[in-house]
Structures are given as C-alpha cells and as structure tokens.
Image (spheres, rainbow, N blue to C red):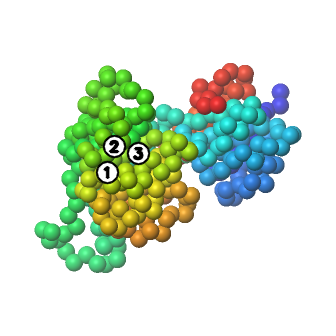
Amino acid sequence: MTQPRVLVTRRWPEAVEAAIADRFDAIFNESDRPLSNDDFKLAFKEVDAILPTVTDHIGASLFEAADTRTRILANYGVGFNHIDVDAAKGRGMVVTNTPDVLSECTADLAMTLMLMAARRVSEGEREVRDGEWSGWRPTHLLGTKISGKTLGLVGFGRIGREVARRAHHGFGMTVKVFNRSPVDPAVLRAFGAEQVASLEELLPQCDFVSLHCQGGADNRHLIDARRLNQMKPTAYLINTARGEVVDEKALAQALWFETIAGAGLDVYDGEPSVHPDLRACDNAVLLPHLGSATFETREAMGFRVIENLQDFFAGRTPRDRVI
Ligand code: 8YV
C-alpha cells in the first residue's frame, strides 16, 4: 500500500521526524527556513497532508488552485489562526491541532513571565552582564511581590486553567476569570476562582492580567488603549496567547508612561519582528515565543500530529479535528 505523502514545513524533534519517516512518504524542510507562498502552492498540488506551524501563513489565496491534492492540514500547535480555516473548509479540507500536551509548559512560561516582570529579572541580568552591578543595597531593583496578589485570566481554557492551578495553589493568588461562556462552578472552585461578567469588571481589580484567549479577527486588539487604562498603574500584563490580541503601540505607550507597571510578552503581532517601541521599554520582558519550547512538549506535540494523521488516513475522525 502506498503511504500518504506529507510535508513537514519546519524541522521537528528528531524522534518525531523519525517516526514520521517510518509511517509516511515524508518531505522534510532540511533548511528549516519558512516556506514561501509558491512552495505552499506546489505542496497543495503534490502532497496529501501539510504539517504547518505558527510561522506558516496559509491564507485564502493558497486554496484557490483547482488541482489540489492536500486533504488535511495537521497543525503542530494548539493555535491555528495562521490558517484561513474558512477557505480550508470551503475546499473540504480537515484541520487538526495539538491541544492538552502543551498546556502545562505554556502555563509554566506564563508564570515565568509574571515573575520575571514583577521581580525585574531581565533588568537585573542585563546589569550583571553589562558589568554595571555596583553591589547589594536595600533599595536596589525593588520589584513587586506576586504571592497573594490578584490574577485576572482572560480566557479559561486548558492553558488558563493550568495557570490558575499554579497561581492559586502555588502562589496563593486570588484568581478572577473573564471567559465568553460560563465556566462550570466546580471547576472555578478547584482554583478558588471567580468568573466576572466583563473585561471592564476584571481589569481594575487585578495586579496581574494574563491572556489565554484565541487569536484571530474576533480578539484582535481586545486589549487596546482604553482597556490598558482600566488596569491599575501597579499592574502587569502577561501575553502567551497571540500578539494580535494586544494593541502593541498602545501597550508600549502604557509601559513608557508607566500607566501600567510592566509586561511579560512571549508573542507578537507580525513576529518575529517586535514593535521597536516595545523593545525600548525596560519594564517589558520580551521572550521569543517559547511557550511550548521544552523537549518533552515539542515531542508530544509531534506525536499528537502523527496520531491525528493516522486517524485521518484510516478513515476515522482525528481526535483534534477543529475543521
Ligand atoms: C507553538 C503555540 O510552539 O501551540 C501554539 O499555539 O503558540 C506554540 O506553543 C507554535 O504554535 C507551533 O506552531
């Protein structure tokens, strides 16, 4: 029996690539450079499955060719806002993602950013590396305590819940949740959390606000100048979700004029370029999209993609089908 032909758009962990090579007629991207639109147009004609990542912008125009062979886009990652899912649906394509396996590591990174921003970790490290540290003193680089403070979560899916677990049970934080749909009270109780009705209600109460909603058009600039103004001047904004959820120019202004205390960002609108005004803010901690970047998680994401593909090609509904 001929194996399905699949295209892996970036380098994946070795063990996963080996497993893919065993099971499929696989094309790997040895150079690990993002593919162009023309590469994708060709791939749509020649492979049964494309295995994209967040760095692949698979827009509507790529779905227009008449002679498309691709039947499934098996995304490596939970977020899939880089794929035009309506266009995929229009072509009868299946789209899958990789939830669950990255929730813990992404939540760990949100906590990392919270601690780094509040405790001024990057400023301190820059000082030591630059040879500028003049020694201990009682007033040196004072930051903000996170234990016992109030954390607002925007979005309460799998990752938001893992952040709530860490924040509440690990750091004794009070957790408030804004989520579009009502959350089961038993789930809220497990994290000592309270659901509030609106962002307007959430933002003024929180010492930390952490974003865990989806990207995409609906949430573009959900956090804009008006909403940043509703945050306390002592509060911190954490974003491990998608860059487009925040109006970055407005955030840079809020940081520069200290209408909020700081931010911890892992994702950016138009990454890998980062808004120059944000890079100029000392009170912003800026990481290069590391949310799921552990050996364990990146392997687990890969094996989850393989499971989805095997189900699909065996005629079963993949467990992580989103379209
Ligand atoms: C991934 C992420 O590394 O899963 C997601 O949505 O943001 C990251 O953890 C990335 O998307 C891989 O495509």
Label 3 residue SS: strand
Q: Position of residue 310 (x, y in %)?
A: 68, 28
In depth, the one of 101 and 226 nearer the eye is 226
Q: Is residue 187 left or right of residue 158?
A: left
* The residue carrying mark 2 has its beta carbon less than 8 Å from ligand 1: no
Looking at the rendered structure, the kind of residue marked 2 is: Glu
Label 2 or label 3, whichever lies nearer to me, is 2
Q: Position of residue 291 (x, y in %)?
A: 46, 48
Identify the residue at image location x=59%, y=25%. Answer: 319
Q: Residues within 10 Å of mark 1 (few under 14, many from 20)?
A: some
Residue 125 visible: no
Which numbered disc covers residue 92?
none
Residue 199 visible: yes
User: Which of disc 3 and disc 2 is earlier in sequence?
Assistant: 2
Q: CA distance from mark 1 to mark 3?
A: 15 Å
Instruction: Give above or below for 305 relative to 122.
Output: above
Where is mark 1, residue-wise?
230
Where is mark 3, residue-wise?
211
Q: CA distance from mark 2 to mark 1?
A: 7 Å
* The residue carrying mark 1 has its beta carbon less than 8 Å from ligand 1: no
Where is mark 2, residue-wise?
200
Position of the C terminus, as image quadrant, is top right
